[in-house]
Image (spheres, grey):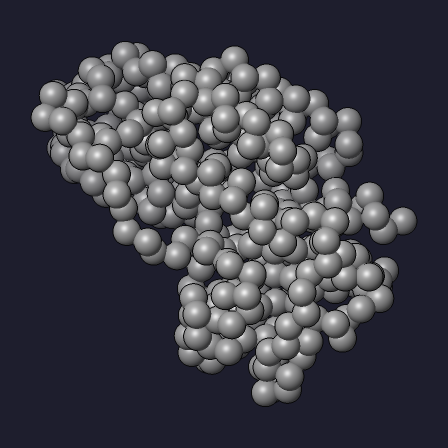
């Protein structure tokens, strides 16, 4: 059921793309006057078909109803506009939308759910404009497309332009994330975030951008990454400095981290391409027990060095570098200088291609 959903997340810069250390929430509750209503009309499904409104971050049903006379409806409240999926019979394909507290009308056909017409939501209108911009580059964001600098520069420019022109839109942080992913320009990310309206900055996705900015200021580019040592899977101590002379991707992950496991195939692909060209990966796991860690390494084909103290978020190396979400990574050059941070998908491939000739 969730395979298609995971592919959607690869195209969506939501908090779901990182496993966050739980900190609780201090968000302000919605007022009683704030609510949404979705009035849907759909053809091609039999009477009584189950319809679910799914949470866009975890894919779990939030509301469930049934089709009656070709219609269905949902009502509820949102603290902030949020990414939602609508499923029929609990299977893909889904209708995707960005829902806010408004009266929304939706019309769709069973064999063309991706062409559903959604009206009444300003945020979803913005989302539709954003999607039209990024759709031609889906393969790039899904780690399948070209990584040439011209394409990256073009898409990054589009994302920057969208963010500047839509500072009052809840979709703007999505564009800022994509720009950051493609360029790694922390100062530009901070500038674009600073231009957002305060209510957008305070949204969940806005908070995620703020977190990226905070992380960029830790262990900054152009500075040495501090040395560390930890036991590998066989109990042998391994230090970062033992890899001096190579480009090293210091990769924080865990077997229980869904976004990490999604990213692993890309890291494997890059490792296989550059492992004989003075590049390697050093994995630091935030696992709690050894066997799931070992099993995940084998299942995902992670044939590089791995270390962990099996202390979950209290992992000593994670504490040393103030890691609050995973996956995270640092790319260091042969002299130990940080030259890249949080490089995922095509950004990792592009960065290595630029430094390893």
Q: Is residue 49 visible?
A: no
Who's the residue at 31% across and 27% down the image?
81
Q: Position of residue 54 (x, y in %)?
A: 27, 39
Question: Could you say where residue 335 lies in the image, as x and y percent from the top left?
Answer: 82, 61
Q: Residue at x 41, y 45 (%)?
A: 16
**172 with respect to 149 (left or right):** left
Question: Foreground residue, 190 or 312?
Answer: 190
Q: How many marks?
A: 0
Relative depth, front residue between 140 and 334: 334
**Could one spot residue 225 in this view of the protein?**
yes
Q: Residue at x 65, y 39 (%)?
A: 184
- Residue lying at the far right in this picture: please name it: 357
Residue 29 screen position, x and y as percent: 18, 34
Quarter assignment of residue 196: top left
Q: Is residue 25 left or right of residue 130?
A: left
| Rendering quarter of residue 36 | top left
Q: Residue furthest bottom?
A: 235
Q: Tell me the residue at 59%/17% (across/down).
A: 161
In the depicted view, which residue is nearer to us: 337 or 71?
337
Percent position (x, y) of residue 270?
72, 54
For residue 280, side relative to residue 208 (left or right): right
Task: Left or right? Give the position of 332 relative to 62.
Answer: right
């Amino acid at each position: 059921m969730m395979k298609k959903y995971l592919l959607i997340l690869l195209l969506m810069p939501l908090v779901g793309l990182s496993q966050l250390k739980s900190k609780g929430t201090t968000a302000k509750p919605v007022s009683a006057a704030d609510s949404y209503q979705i009035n849907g009309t759909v053809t091609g499904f039999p009477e009584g078909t189950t319809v679910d409104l799914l949470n866009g971050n975890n894919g779990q049903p939030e509301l469930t109803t049934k089709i009656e006379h070709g219609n269905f409806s949902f009502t509820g409240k949102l603290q902030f506009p949020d990414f939602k999926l609508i499923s029929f019979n609990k299977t893909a394909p889904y209708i995707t939308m960005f829902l806010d507290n408004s009266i929304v009308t939706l019309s769709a056909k069973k064999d063309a759910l991706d062409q559903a017409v959604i009206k009444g939501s300003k945020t979803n209108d913005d989302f539709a404009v954003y999607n039209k911009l990024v759709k031609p580059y889906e393969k790039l964001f899904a780690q399948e497309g070209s990584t040439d600098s011209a394409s990256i520069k073009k898409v990054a420019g589009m994302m920057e332009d969208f963010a500047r022109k839509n500072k009052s839109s809840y979709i703007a942080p999505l564009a800022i994330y994509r720009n950051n992913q493609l360029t790694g320009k922390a100062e530009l990310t901070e500038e674009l975030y600073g231009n957002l309206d305060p209510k957008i900055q305070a949204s969940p996705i806005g908070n995620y951008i703020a977190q990226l900015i905070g992380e960029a200021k830790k262990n900054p580019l152009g500075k040495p990454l501090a040395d560390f040592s930890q036991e590998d899977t066989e109990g042998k101590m391994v230090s970062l400095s033992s890899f001096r002379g190579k480009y090293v991707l210091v990769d924080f992950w865990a077997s229980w981290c869904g976004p990490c496991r999604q990213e692993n195939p890309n890291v494997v692909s890059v490792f296989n391409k550059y492992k004989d060209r003075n590049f390697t990966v050093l994995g630091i796991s935030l696992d709690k027990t050894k066997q799931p860690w070992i099993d995940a390494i084998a299942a995902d084909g992670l044939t590089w060095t791995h270390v962990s103290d099996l202390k979950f978020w209290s992992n000593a190396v994670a504490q040393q570098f103030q890691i609050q979400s995973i996956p995270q990574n640092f790319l260091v050059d042969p002299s130990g200088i940080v030259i890249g941070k949080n490089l995922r998908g095509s950004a990792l491939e592009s960065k290595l291609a630029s430094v390893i000739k």
